[in-house]
Image (cartoon, rainbow, N blue to C red):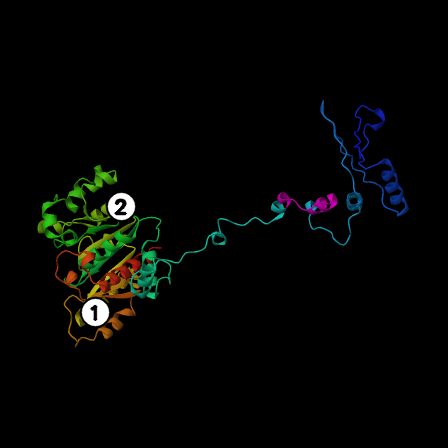
Amino acid sequence: MPAVTPNPSTPSDAGQPVIRRSSWAEAAAAADEAKTAGHLPAPTRPPVSFQPEAGQSFQAEEATPEASTSAEARVAVDTAPPSSDAAPDTAAGTETLRRGNRPSTADVIANAPMPDFISSPGLFVREQKPRPVGGLRGALYSLSGGAWNLGPGAKQREEDELGRRISRQLQGSYNTAVLSLKGGIGKTSTTVGVGLTLAEFRGDPPCAIDANPDSGDLVERALGEGIYQQATPRTISDLLKNIESIDSLTALARYMHHAGRLHLIAGEQDPEVSDSLTAAEYLRIRKLISNYYSVALTDCGTGVTHNAMSGILQSADNLIIAAGYAVSGAKRARSTLQWLAHHGYEDLARNAIVVITDKVEVSSRVDKDAIEEHLSGICRQLIAVPHDRGVADGDLVTLDVLKPETRRAYKEIAAAIVDGYR
């Protein structure tokens, strides 16, 4: 059947929709049937006008009864009023239903609640279990190439928690004094072991000060006797002589020694000079150290009455009381705490950490439990360091040669120290 080509130049056809039928007779019959059936009038939206370009002509497609029926159905849907039973919740939804269209992707995104990517990252990233180290869990992880990850065991979780407590970020500078009433019971070895542990876990290096008036050997225990003798013999006395000229960490480093990340100030070795450190001089050193270090340890020497002790206690944030597995050692530690409480340092005594070091591997006749019970009720925490040749021989203290139990004890002491910094 020949196609009907509309003439765009005819004035009467301007602005009228183009009706595509196979013949004018069929179009008229379809219009009469629509009026007879009571169909709604044609949609009121403006028709689409096709303007052919020069040299082009649009031919009307041959319409079929099925196509005509579907077109009339679309007209009824477009012109039907919205139902009152389906009231949308938002204005955007109302506009969408009024148009008779499905919600667009932009409408869905605009009306959806925005997830919190910052406070709820677990919504988008699956949490990964920490890698187990050692034991059966670690072996399974290694053999399976990471496919079987049971997570860390209870022991590893405790170790990780100790590391987290030690590495806690601090605001300001803090000082821990290590003291005892008797020599040779682990005071200096505890200072070195705890200092090296703090240096291992903390992001900022700690500083250890040898304020022992009796020719202290703090640096020798941290570096080894041979290395210390070869180093530049700068001591706390040299630091005091030039303290006014030190205005940077670089200038301060000239008077310090380094055992890995542990920075140390050596004590005076000359007996005639070592006992001359006063409380005021120590406070000057402590003030200088506080500008560059967040954690400082002070090896105080034996006793609590020497010249510098009042300055040390005045600037201390907490204490470590060194003791041994002997009745006399327990009594001395208890006497130290009582002296502190009666001389204006009650808070330091109450929050003190008592460290019992088994240096001589005491015999089975010593009741360790009774000694620990005797001291545990008068301090914040009591920690025992087991017998270890790496500590007991009085020479170099390095974490690599210590027993796992000894390293664990030093970690507990370091964590307890940082817990006390408030």
Point 26% across, 62% down: residue: 408
Residue to which mark 2 is pinned: 287
Q: Earlier in the sequence, mark 1 or mark 2?
A: 2
Point 74% across, 30% down: residue: 58
The image quadrant where one finds the C terminus is bottom left
Considering the whole magenta stretch, tell me its main secondary structure: helix
Q: Quadrant of residue 52?
A: top right
- The reply to whether residue 304 is in sight is no
User: Percent position (x, y) of residue 37?
Assistant: 88, 48
Task: Assess disc 2: are there few (<14), some (14-19) or many (≥20) residues with their C-alpha within 10 Å of its C-alpha.
Answer: few
Tell which of 420 and 91 is nearer to you: 91
Q: Quadrant of residue 342?
A: bottom left
The image quadrant where one finds the N terminus is top right
Instruction: Identify the secondary structure beneath mark 2.
Output: helix
The kind of residue on which mark 1 rests is Ala
The kind of residue on which mark 2 rests is Lys
Side of 233 where 133 appears, left or right:
right
Residue to which mark 1 is pinned: 330
Point 81% across, 29% down: residue: 15
- The reply to whether residue 264 is in sight is yes
- The correct choice, above or below, for 67 with respect to 189 in the image is above
Tell which of 142 and 290 is nearer to you: 142
Counting the numbered discs, the total is 2
Q: Which segment did they paint magenta?
A: 93-107
User: Percent position (x, y) of residue 406?
Assistant: 22, 63
Instruction: Identify the secondary structure beneath mark 1.
Output: helix
